[in-house]
Image (cartoon, grey):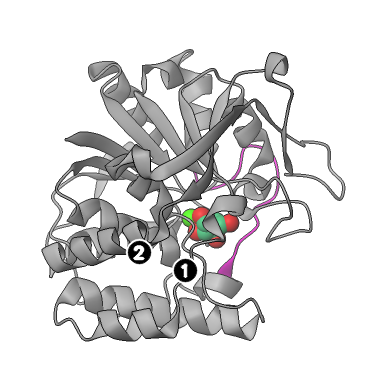
Amino acid sequence: MKRLILDVDTGLDDAVALLLAAGLEELHIEAVIATAGNVGLEKTLENTLNIMETVGATCPVYKGADKPLLRESVEAGDFHGVTGMDGPTFAPRKRQQVQEESGIDALIRLLKENPHQLSVVSVGPLTDLALAMAKEEGIALLAKEIVIMGGSFSYGNVTKAAEFNTYADPEAAQIVFSSGANITLFSLDCTRTVTLDKKRLEAYRKKAGRATEVFAACMDTYMANYEKKGQGWPQMHDPLCIAYLADPTKVECEYAPVAVDIEEGPTYGQTVKLPSHEGEQIRIARSIDIPWFWSLVERALDHLD
Ligand code: BDR
Ligand code: CA
């Protein structure tokens, strides 16, 4: 079983990533850190706690960074709604509450206590990881692997050049990508190939349980927002990182060092592949087995319901 630390800016597709991680028997969530990103930290934390309570998880939830390393905050409420997770409603929580320890300290502690044992998944801005690396040199090398949703090598989704997570904290992304850690990157070039259509959503909605109800309510909003923006069916960015951990053989990858543009200007936050001798190699996902991915979502929801 793979043991995970999840760093999320929950987020409608982050919510699906959490559901998937919680619902797959081959994965075990050790800790979740909420970071600022899609919306402010208080909201991403609230959303994270609500999802973890819904799935009956007992793992600790921590508070990560409330702003990027250097730049002004940017948010993505146009995709995720005012709360960051518009759609589902939740009863007051009985179990889940945020831990006292900061997410950055927890990340450092857990990696030191479990060297080369834990897979870290980051599906928001990379601020927490970069802060942990600044506080404890070499900490990223203690992760078994780091699986990241971020970047684009073609065109962006927040500017023409940049993807949201790298644009929201380009300096942090540059630090993490050049760390020499064992990184797998899901860029938009892969994640935008996996979309949820109405037929599939309606088929899922017929299932009875609470996890599916939350999933469907999140996806109703996500679908409506994509439609409003004229962007087709909603893209399943963050859950692909979890699917990869469940079975890496279902993902085709290439290797290259990746740099992030940290010069303010039209390409701020853009990711580029470098020639292989010019930096630390990163595993970059090129494609994923899409029918298999959906079968995984179905299995996870069945298990949680
Ligand atoms: C990424 O940006 C966020 O809005 C999503 O949650 C995802 O992590 C996609 O660019
Ligand atoms: Ca996200």
Pick whichever, 167 or 208, lies toward us. 208
The N terminus - image quarter: top left
Q: Nearer the viewer, residue 65 or 298?
A: 298
Separation of residues labelled 1 and 2 (CA atoms):
8 Å
Horizontal arrangement in the rendering, residue 261 relative to residue 48 (left or right)? right
- Seen in the image, is 74 located left or right of residue 51? right
Q: Name the image quarter holding residue 31.
A: top left
Q: Secondary structure at mark 2?
A: helix
Query: Mark 2 belongs to which amino acid?
Result: Asn
Does the CB distance between marks 1 and 2 fall below 8 Å? yes
- Residue 40, position as x, y percentages in the image: 51, 59
Q: Which residue is mark 1?
A: 84
Q: Quadrant of the C terminus?
A: bottom left
Between 218 and 200, the residue placed more toward the observer is: 200
Instruction: Return the disc, 1 or 2, that comes first in the chain's sequence.
Output: 2
Q: Which residue lies under the disc numbered 2?
A: 47
